[in-house]
Amino acid sequence: MNNSSASLILAAHLAVLSSLSFGGFPTVLPDVHDFTVARGWVTDQEFANFFAVSQIMPGPNMILMMSFIGLKVGGIAGAAASALATFGPPCAMYYLSYRLWDRFREMPWQRIVRRGLAPLTIGLVIAGGYVMARSAAVGWQSAAITAAAVVMMFARRLNPLWILTAGGALGGLGFL
Amino acid sequence: MPMRGENGGSGERVTLSALFLGFLKVSLCGFGGGLVWARRVVVEQKRWMNEQEFAETLTLCQLMPGPNIVGITVCVGAKLRGAIGATIAVAGFILLPWSVGLSLGGFLLQHAEIGGVRNILGGLSAAAAGLLIGTGLRLLVPYRSRYTALLFAGLAFAGMAFTRLPLPIVLLALAPISIAVARIEDARAR
């Protein structure tokens, strides 16, 4: 197979998806899966592995995951093309919309819109944590770790890294 | 209303290297959800935005396609130093962590099926979930005396956590009502 043309097709597809990924990139993951597996570029198992490994890496998870697919399809150049396609188009849109938003900052209607929207966003963040907790929960032990992390994060300004380390250590010691 | 320019940096300009390093930190620390670290660095440590401004920026980013956390990076960079600032902030967020992640992850993937690591991952993800919830609760603090805000935060939470509806649907259903209520409150306050 011609690697560079496969990389280009993948990058073009990712660029379209990233421009449509309202609600974050995970919402378009099923599409990426079908697109790449159907073409025989990656197997189901590889796709799952890419996801797991990208989740345990620090940094931009979804960009990294798309890069793993690009790496498989077209080497380092494929990985770079996939990364660019994943964050490039949204970055341009973020910038333009921030400029517009900022220009009308002093308008009374915008203050009202902000006041109306902010609580929704916050509710969605908490829901994201809840959904993650639910998928991580294997019993009361993991629920207890989550609850402890909530309290430590909310009540004390403890460095989140300590909380994560404690969670990982408890898991590694067989607490779960 | 607490908005522009009142957060510390009104006098001196934030340097580009500070932006680069700040978002490098957000990126490197932010496993299991970069939002926790974005808020910690941008609001608590650097005071580039206040709590409310951060929540509003996050809203804007959630309404747009793409990785929300990259959106916050762009917005903070653009606010402090314009287009250059946005580019540098994104470079800080992506460049180094991406290179490290790609080589380290590529190595891991060649030796896939990592036995006891699964338990550690379980504990990590449970803690990461708690951090996200805690971050959300902290963002809610400035709104604690506005009962309608708490109500709409609760509705958004329930809509997303319990109904399995896609996020755009939840936002489109709740946003008009929430904005209308904010408008009525605003008119009353005058």
Image (spheres, rainbow, N blue to C red):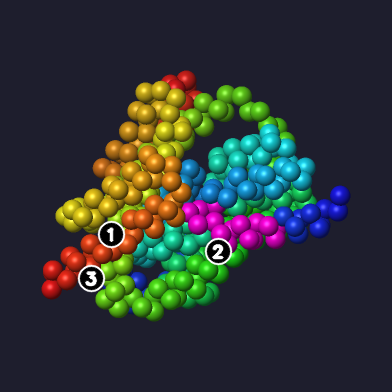
Q: Amino acid at mark 2?
A: Pro
Of the pair A63 and B30, the residue shown nearer to us = A63
Displayed quadrant of residue B47:
bottom left
Identity of the residue drawn at 77% across and 46% down = A39
Residue tagged 2: A90
Q: Determine which residue is flagged by label 1.
A: B178
- Looking at the magenta stretch, what is its main secondary structure? helix
Q: Is residue A158 visible?
A: no
Judged left or right of residue B42, residue B52 is left
Quadrant that contains the N terminus of chain B: bottom left
Mark 3 falls on what kind of element? loop
Closest to the camera, between mark 2 and mark 3, is 2
Magenta region: A11-25
> Disc 1 residue type?
Ser
Please report contact status of discs 3 and 1: CB closer than 8 Å, yes or no.
no
A14 is within the stretch colored magenta: yes
Query: Is B61 left or right of A53, judged from the image as shown?
Result: left
Disc 3: CA contacts within 10 A as few (<14), some (14-19) or many (>=20) = few
Q: Residue beneath label 3, please?
A: B1
